Image: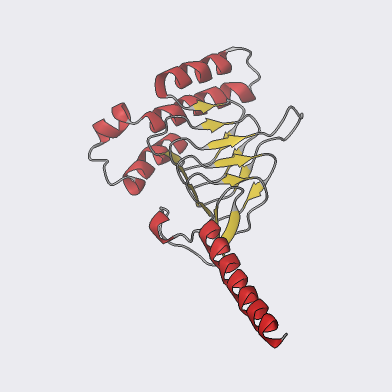
């Protein structure tokens, strides 16, 4: 059962999880996904009002807003979870981990599929925003605070605003992001620019000497 898998994955993902009692009664991320699975089941049966009521109650209870229409796979884990938002047409695969403040949202008032599709084995760092009808491939890591507005290929790491691919084509076996080891793409860009300016200044000085 998906709910049993959702409980088991807490112990796999969170070293702070000490007991089954603690996980079942004190983890808002688990409460949110259990509420969502009930609401989504009722949503698929086209029962009016009740799925949205369950979703609203869950948001009040946990601080996590998951639309009942969102499709979520097995072993889904929201760590801490406050402020997480998951839109109606979002599709999430298996073994996905979201940290607090993650938004899987839309970019406007368009109809139809307007939220992202996430593959399997994905980690989204705190505050990451994945926006629009885009696809995030399998085994992808998204750095904290990143804003993703374009597709991300399999086996990649994306960071920045807007997010850029900093690692591609590599499998990362670790479950969590090592933010201290992620490159600072803005700093790298500034350093390259400074180096280029320095080279141009040297060329200009040489040109002035020859006159």
Which residue shows up at 25% across the image and 32% down it? 22
> Relative to residue 12, is residue 122 drawn left or right?
right
Near-viewer residue (102 or 210):
210
Name the quadrant containing residue 167: bottom right
Vertically, is 116 above or below 202? above
Relative image position of residue 198 (x, y in whole percent) = 58, 73
- In-image side of 183 versus 31 (left or right): right
Q: In what quadrant of the picture does the N terminus appear? A: top left
x then y, percent, for residue 45:
63, 21
Instruction: Report x, y in % for residue 125.
Output: 46, 46
Q: Nearer the viewer, residue 137 or 183?
A: 183
Q: Quadrant of the C terminus?
A: bottom right
- List the single residue furthest toward the bottom: 210
User: Colour mode?
Assistant: secondary structure
Q: Is residue 180 above or below residue 127?
A: below
178 versus 126 height, above or below:
below
Residue depicted at x 26% and y 42%? 16
The percent coordinates of residue 131 (x first, y second) are 64, 39
Q: Is residue 1 visible?
A: no
Q: Residue at x 72, y 30 (%)?
A: 108
């Amino acid at each position: 059962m998906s709910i049993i898998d959702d409980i088991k994955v807490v112990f796999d993902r969170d070293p702070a999880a000490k007991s089954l009692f603690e996980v079942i009664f004190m983890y808002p991320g688990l409460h949110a996904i259990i509420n969502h699975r009930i609401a989504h089941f009722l949503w698929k049966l086209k029962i009016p009002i009740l799925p949205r009521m369950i979703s609203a109650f869950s948001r009040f209870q946990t601080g996590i807003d998951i639309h009942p229409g969102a499709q979520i796979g097995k072993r889904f884990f929201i760590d801490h979870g406050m402020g997480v938002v998951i839109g109606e047409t979002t599709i999430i695969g298996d073994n996905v981990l979201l940290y607090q403040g993650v938004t899987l949202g839309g970019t406007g008032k368009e109809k139809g599929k307007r939220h992202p599709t996430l593959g399997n084995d994905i980690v989204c760092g705190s505050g990451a925003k994945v926006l629009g009808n885009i696809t995030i491939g399998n085994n992808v890591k998204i750095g904290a605070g990143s804003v993703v507005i374009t597709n991300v290929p399999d086996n990649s790491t994306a960071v920045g605003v807007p997010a850029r691919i900093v690692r591609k084509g590599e499998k990362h076996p670790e479950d969590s992001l090592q933010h201290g080891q992620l490159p600072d793409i803005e700093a790298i860009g500034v350093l390259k620019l400074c180096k280029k300016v320095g080279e141009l200044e040297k060329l200009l000085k040489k040109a002035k000497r020859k006159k």
